[in-house]
Amino acid sequence: MIHPFSYYQNRSSKDLNDILCTACRRGRIDKLRYMLTTPEISKKIDIHHRNAICFDWMLYSKRFEVLKYLIFEYKIEKTKDIDDCLKKDHGLICQEVIKMFEMRDLQLDLSSELKNREVGIKKVKI
């Protein structure tokens, strides 16, 4: 269940970050998506707070679908803290997450290259 907006409205950033981390740890993509995409809430939270503890908990809890959402849809920044989390011994999931970041970066590079080529082709046709 996602609480109504009023539940989050007057909470401190610390409280909201704790709620966010709990949603990550429990695999609550619906709550995570709501918090990250609601402007009044998202401006008060930090997915990277406390050395990316949320990310570390997701690795430990093996929340593959939540990690996939953050990497491919939310496009979470791969910070030094996230790199440090990936170096911990959480098993094979870390290798999979590293591959997901690599795939995302490759997709972004290819998309950018295709856009640049499309612009070049349009210039030639004119």
Image (cartoon, rainbow, N blue to C red):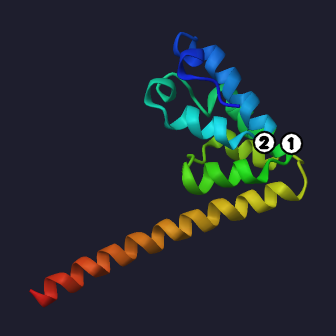
In screen coordinates, is 8 left or right of 121? right
Residue 39 appears at what percent x and percent y?
44, 30
Q: Secondary structure at mark 2?
A: helix
* Pointer 2 local density, CA inside 10 Å: few below 14, some 14–19, many at least 20: many
Disc 2 residue type (three-letter) = Met
Disc 1 residue type (three-letter) = Ser
Q: Which quadrant: the N terminus? A: top right
Residue designated by label 1:
61
Residue 49 appears at what percent x and percent y?
63, 27
Res. 72 image quadrant: bottom right
* Image marks 1 and 2: residues in contact by CB distance under 8 Å: yes
Q: Which quadrant: the C terminus? A: bottom left
Can you name the residue that lies furthest to the left here? 126
Residue 34 appears at what percent x and percent y?
57, 36
In screen coordinates, is 87 left or right of 108? right
Q: Secondary structure at mark 1?
A: helix
Picture layout, residue 40 above or below residue 97? above
Which residue appears at 22% of the width and 81% of the height?
A: 120
Picture layout, residue 7 above or below residue 74? above
Residue designated by label 2:
58
Which residue appears at 71% of the width and 65% of the height?
A: 99
**Spatial distance from mark 1 to mark 2, Cα to Cα?**
5 Å
Res. 53 mark: none
Can you name the residue that lies furthest to the bottom here? 125
Residue 27 appears at what percent x and percent y?
77, 41
Res. 21 image quadrant: top right
Which residue appears at 64% of the width and 23% of the height?
A: 17
Picture layout, residue 23 above or below residue 119? above
